[in-house]
Amino acid sequence: MIQHTMIVSFDQPLPDAELDQYLADIERVMLDSGAVQSVATRRHLPVPGEDAIPALIATAIVQLSVADMDALAKAFGAPGVHEVIGRWQSRHPYKVAWANHEALA
């Protein structure tokens, strides 16, 4: 089992409804790929003063569970994935950092 954990950082703050829709769209398209066993999404919980730190600070976290690296490649190559990402990037630019790893617990 492989975990693909994405730290998503939007360039500008998003209204709650927009962030909810982004997370729902990502979850749907990943599950529709048939290659993902599960998807978990959460909002970042900010702490006072973190905006002064010169680092990529998350807006949200997306974690995919896949059987192996081939399944991960299949998920990101599935129809609709790049369209969803492109649509959100064009409306609300964001950066992503990620890590592929075994389960942490």
Image (tube, helix red, strand yellow):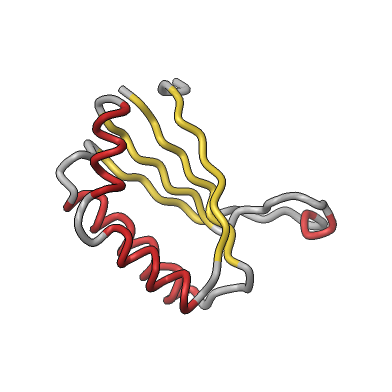
Q: Is residue 83 left or right of residue 43?
A: left
Residue shown at 48%/45% (left/top)? 6
x, y percentage for residue 58?
60, 53
Question: Residue 2, percent across and down?
Answer: 35, 26
Location of residue 34 by image quarter: top left
As drawn, is 51 to the left or to the right of 22?
right
Q: Please give the name of the residue rendered at 67% of the width and 53% of the height, measured from the top-left corner.
A: 57
In depth, the one of 70 and 17 nearer the eye is 70
From the viewer's side, name the closer residue of 71 and 37.
Answer: 71
Residue 4, position in %: x, y? 41, 36
Q: In which quadrant of the rendered view does residue 66 lie?
A: top left
Q: Quadrant of the C terminus?
A: top left
User: How many numbered discs, if any?
Assistant: 0
Task: Please tell me whether residue 82 is drawn above or below residue 40 in the rendered image.
Answer: below
Identity of the residue drawn at 42% across and 76% down: 17
Q: Residue at x 52, y 78 (%)?
A: 15
In the displayed structure, does residue 60 sit left or right of residue 80?
Answer: right
Residue 13 point in image, percent of width and height = 61, 73
Vertical comparison of 102 with 71: above or below: above
Q: Quadrant of the N terminus?
A: top left
> Is 74 situated above or below 54?
above
Which corner quadrant of the image does residue 52 belong to?
A: bottom right
